[in-house]
């Protein structure tokens, strides 16, 4: 028996170097370790300072809220847990823990929740669950400390109904503002995470329900029974938003998919036609991308696509549209951009991607590869007597013609169509523009770009 146990311990020890956490960047591994260590220290300190069995009422309420958490996990299992950024409704049950009970309960509750999620819903790398539990636990404890510091009430006392209502609500709302109470995906912007209309509506609804549940439980714990139907509705609402967002996004790059880009681009073109403002469309194609798939595999190609997609967003404004048009081709729509502006943006993108090392393997010793792009640009011209849909089609056709010329004349170039010609410029050493370049579609652009 002892030899078998030692054998299992040795097998687990040999598996440690293969844990997915070690594939992360060293600073990120250190950060995860630091947060997890702080979480363990906080739990130990809370247990010493606030014994568990000080009140049977606290234990009963803690158990009831954990039961509600377990039921919510089971509801999530039925509809599935989305990958990436996860918006959940567990705040409804964890806010009462943070406000009505000592911090030790708010600290350990996420361990139960994320363990159950890992077992019952979806198995993911364990370090992600551990880190999420640590972040949420520390946030819950911080909310508890902030609330009781504002109200001046001890942890052992359950707030009474006669507490000042304004102070109560302000304290609860303040405690909810702590970062990391909900996990955040680093690739998601603050605007996407908090300021999108559907996200704001759902977050406000969740916070209101959580505050009302907390207030109700302070009066009678039976409020939990009345709160569960609201949680079910909130969860369905969150799922609806997730499905809508997923239908708009290309899964490999996180950019808009082709259908969504075309719909939103048609709207922007219609606005530009109505207001007589400038607008540009650019088509981007990765040069010799098939060689990446053939040499390193399609997973490496997908990694390269994601890297280039992130690079594209660096040079764009908030109201620009960028989408994946299919394969290795991307589309940009630049509102209020004249031909010279669009050329400068496209040239900066081309130069940046051309000088950027792209990692296509998890092997730290693997050499990064270099890729280049060709860009075709077209600008909305003076002739605007056709519909917005026809205008967009003409712009895409003109940009595609410019992209063809960039490919034909050596790649790694930016070509811009004008009303009278197609003019291109590329990287130093690129092939010179062909003398027989095809003219642009009539009315496509209003300005010519001089070759440098």
Image: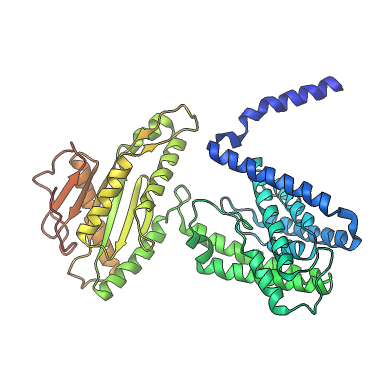
Q: Is residue 114 above or below residue 18?
A: below
Q: Which colour scheme is used?
A: rainbow
Residue at the spot 65% in from the left edge and 49% down from the top edge? 132
Q: Position of residue 320 (x, y in %)?
A: 35, 61
Quadrant in the rendering for residue 226: bottom right
Quadrant in the rendering for residue 168: bottom right
- The number of discs equals 0
> 433 and 262: which one is in front?
433
> 221 and 437: which one is in front?
221
Quadrant in the rendering for residue 407: top left
- Residue 160 is left or right of residue 291, and the answer is right
Q: Position of residue 34 (x, y in %)?
A: 63, 42
- Residue 49 is left or right of residue 39, and the answer is right
Residue at the spot 86% in from the left edge and 61% down from the top edge? 58
- Residue 435 is left or right of residue 277, and the answer is left
Residue at the spot 33% in from the left edge and 66% down from the top edge? 266
Quadrant showing the N terminus: top right
> 49 and 92: which one is in front?
49
Q: Position of residue 35 (x, y in %)?
A: 64, 46
Q: Position of residue 206 (x, y in %)?
A: 65, 68
User: What residue occupies the far top of the structure in this picture?
Assistant: 3
> 113 and 326: which one is in front?
113
- Residue 203 is left or right of residue 372, and the answer is right
Residue at the spot 44% in from the left edge and 40% down from the top edge? 303
């Amino acid at each position: 028996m002892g030899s078998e146990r030692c054998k299992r311990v040795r097998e687990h020890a040999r598996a440690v170097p293969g844990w997915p956490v070690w594939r992360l960047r060293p600073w990120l591994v250190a950060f995860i370790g630091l947060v997890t260590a702080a979480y363990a220290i906080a739990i130990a300190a809370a247990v010493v300072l606030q014994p568990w069995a000080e009140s049977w009422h606290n234990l009963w309420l803690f158990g009831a809220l954990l039961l509600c958490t377990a039921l919510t996990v089971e509801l999530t299992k039925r509809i599935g847990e989305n990958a990436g950024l996860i918006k959940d409704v567990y705040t409804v049950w964890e806010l009462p823990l943070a406000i009505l009970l000592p911090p030790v309960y708010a600290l350990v509750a996420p361990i139960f929740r994320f363990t159950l999620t890992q077992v019952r819903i979806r198995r993911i790398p364990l370090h992600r669950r551990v880190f999420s539990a640590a972040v949420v636990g520390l946030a819950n404890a911080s909310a508890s400390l902030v609330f009781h510091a504002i109200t001046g009430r001890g942890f052992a006392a359950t707030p009474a109904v006669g507490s000042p209502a304004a102070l109560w609500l302000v304290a609860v709302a303040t405690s909810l503002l702590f970062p990391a109470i909900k996990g955040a995906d680093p690739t998601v912007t603050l605007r996407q995470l908090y300021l999108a209309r559907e996200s704001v509506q759902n977050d406000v609804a969740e916070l209101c329900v959580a505050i009302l549940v907390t207030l109700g439980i302070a009066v009678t714990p039976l409020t939990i029974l009345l709160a569960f139907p609201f949680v079910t509705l909130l969860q369905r609402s969150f799922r609806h938003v997730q499905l809508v967002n997923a239908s708009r996004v290309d899964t490999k790059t996180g950019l808009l998919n082709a259908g969504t880009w075309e719909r939103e681009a048609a709207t922007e073109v219609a606005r530009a036609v109505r207001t007589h403002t400038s607008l540009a469309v650019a088509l981007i194609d990765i040069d010799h991308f098939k060689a990446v798939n053939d040499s390193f595999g399609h997973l490496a190609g997908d990694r390269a696509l994601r890297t280039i997609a992130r690079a594209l967003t660096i040079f764009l404004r908030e109201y620009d549209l960028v989408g994946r048009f299919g394969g290795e081709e991307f589309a940009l729509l630049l509102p209020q951009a004249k031909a010279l502006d669009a050329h400068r943006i496209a040239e900066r993108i081309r130069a940046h991607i051309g000088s950027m090392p792209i990692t296509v393997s998890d092997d730290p010793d693997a050499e990064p590869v270099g890729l280049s792009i060709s860009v075709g640009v077209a600008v909305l011209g003076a002739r605007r007597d056709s519909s917005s849909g026809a205008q967009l089609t003409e712009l895409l056709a003109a940009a595609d013609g410019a992209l063809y010329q960039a490919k034909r004349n050596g790649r790694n170039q930016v070509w811009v169509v004008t009303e009278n010609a197609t003019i291109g410029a590329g990287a130093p050493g690129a092939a010179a523009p062909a003398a027989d370049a095809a003219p642009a579609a009539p009315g496509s652009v209003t300005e010519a770009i001089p070759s440098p």
